[in-house]
């Protein structure tokens, strides 16, 4: 159930496309059932997407507790807003939008962001680096130490592959702002990594 | 140089894990939250219900006050005149109460306070209770407007309630009716 959106490795592209199409149909059916109030179907959607939603929340917040709360809030909001999901984008993309909103809403409500930056500067590895290996952990840690705006744009754009238009839409800022923040993020990351003796 | 650096960073970033498993299962809390019945009330409903209640209350109190003071019986009482505080509209720095209203109000308040001393204790109590209700309503509407500053219904209601306050004082003080509308704010 956890692998509704199948990630295939290997050369069987036709098989992968076919399986992905089947998964998408399955997912559409689950969304329809969940929209009708079937919480079991919604749980299946949760199981399929929670790692990706939580991953985004963790990379955006850099804090396990905050990320758990944001991911939870995102799924609760998704349940409430299922009737508005028209299938124009993939369910996973729609969930990411809700998760970004949950993270931004939480940051707006709390002043903890300043504390988080302080803690991140004092601590070693970021919790998000758990999923990474080797040198990527250093990059993950460096991302976690970025200022909020630059970090959010870098995570959406560079890590999750969203376009500037998609990132700006999710974050509620101008496209020019995401471009400037991405440039800033790259510059700061390069500085950090150079200081640590890595060739950027 | 910068382009090569950016490319390397982007390539490295694409290898970062996009799926991270939470340390605990979040589903039980989510399931509990979505199982709770959705409150049917919208945010606007209580505000308008409150507004309607305020209109009824203000109208009733104004009527009662009129009945209480319509017989112009001068009664000298010894109690001191209470100080009536004036709650200004507080919905946004771009809005202020108009000068015409403020001048009229100052005139009405002066006459009202003079006349109030001549009422009997019972009549005086009626007037004070009415004004207390109206001023409570003004506070409530101002609080609602702080949440929703552009709500024209609430702005109108606030002006009507200020108007009711003036009417009560006018009836007591025998002062000519003031002119005020939402444009005065």
Image (cartoon, rainbow, N blue to C red):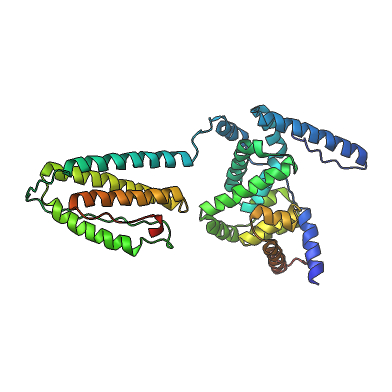
Residue at coordinates 77% horizontally, 62% vertically from top-left? B9
Say whether residue B14 is left or right of residue B21.
right
Kindly indicate the quadrant of the structure image that contains residue A94: top right
Kindly indicate the quadrant of the structure image that contains residue A168: bottom right
Query: Closest to the observer: B108 or A34?
Result: B108
- Horizontal and vertical percent position of residue B172: 19, 50
Say whether residue A58 is left or right of residue B149.
right
Query: Closest to the observer: B38 or B101?
Result: B101
Judge whether residue A126 can be spotted in this image.
no
The quadrant of the picture occupied by the C terminus of chain A is bottom right
Query: Closest to the observer: B26 or B35?
Result: B35
- Horizontal and vertical percent position of residue B99: 33, 64
In this rendering, the count of numbered labels is 0
- Horizontal and vertical percent position of residue A123: 60, 57
Judge whether residue B67 can be spotted in this image.
yes
The quadrant of the picture occupied by the N terminus of chain A is top right
Kindly indicate the quadrant of the structure image that contains residue B24: top right
Furthest-front residue in this view: B176
Residue at coordinates 41% horizontally, 58% vertically from top-left? B183
Answer above or below: position of B156 versus B34. Answer: below
Residue at coordinates 56% horizontally, 34% vertically from top-left? B33
Residue at coordinates 88% horizontally, 36% vertically from top-left? A18
Answer above or below: position of B72 versus A29. Answer: below
- Horizontal and vertical percent position of residue B149: 45, 53
Say whether residue B75 is left or right of residue B98.
left
């Amino acid at each position: 159930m956890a692998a509704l959106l199948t990630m295939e490795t290997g050369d069987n592209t036709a098989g992968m496309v076919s399986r992905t199409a089947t998964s998408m149909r399955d997912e559409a059916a689950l969304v329809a059932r969940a929209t009708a109030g079937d919480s079991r179907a919604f749980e299946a959607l949760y199981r399929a997407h929670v790692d990706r939603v939580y991953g985004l929340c963790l990379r955006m917040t850099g804090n396990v507790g905050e990320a758990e709360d944001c991911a939870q809030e995102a799924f609760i909001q998704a349940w409430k807003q299922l009737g508005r999901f028209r299938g124009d984008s993939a369910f996973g993309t729609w969930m990411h939008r809700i998760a970004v909103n949950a993270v931004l809403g939480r940051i707006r409500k709390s002043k903890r962001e300043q504390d988080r930056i302080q803690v991140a500067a004092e601590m070693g590895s970021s919790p998000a680096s758990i999923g990474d290996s080797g040198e990527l952990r250093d990059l993950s840690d460096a991302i976690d130490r970025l200022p909020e705006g630059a970090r959010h744009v870098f995570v959406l754009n560079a890590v999750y592959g969203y376009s500037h238009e998609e990132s700006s839409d999710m974050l509620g800022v101008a496209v020019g702002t995401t471009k400037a923040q991405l440039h800033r993020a790259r510059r700061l990351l390069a500085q950090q990594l150079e200081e640590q003796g890595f060739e950027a | 140089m910068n382009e090569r650096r950016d490319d390397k960073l982007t390539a490295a970033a694409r290898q970062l894990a996009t799926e991270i498993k939470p340390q605990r299962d979040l589903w039980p809390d989510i399931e509990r939250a979505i199982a709770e019945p959705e409150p049917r009330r919208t945010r606007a409903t209580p505000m308008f219900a409150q507004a309607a209640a305020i209109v009824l209350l203000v109208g009733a109190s104004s009527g009662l006050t009129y009945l209480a003071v319509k017989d112009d019986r001068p009664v000298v009482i010894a109690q001191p005149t209470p100080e009536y505080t004036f709650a200004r509209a507080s919905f946004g720095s771009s809005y202020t109460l108009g000068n015409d209203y403020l001048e009229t109000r100052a005139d009405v308040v002066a006459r009202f306070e003079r006349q109030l001393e001549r009422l009997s204790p019972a009549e005086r109590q009626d007037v004070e209770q009415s004004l207390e209700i109206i001023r409570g309503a003004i506070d409530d509407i101002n609080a609602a407007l702080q949440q929703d500053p552009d709500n024209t219904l609430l702005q109108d209601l606030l002006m009507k309630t200020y108007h009711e306050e003036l009417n009560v004082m006018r009836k007591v003080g025998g002062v000519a009716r003031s002119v005020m509308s939402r444009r005065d704010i």
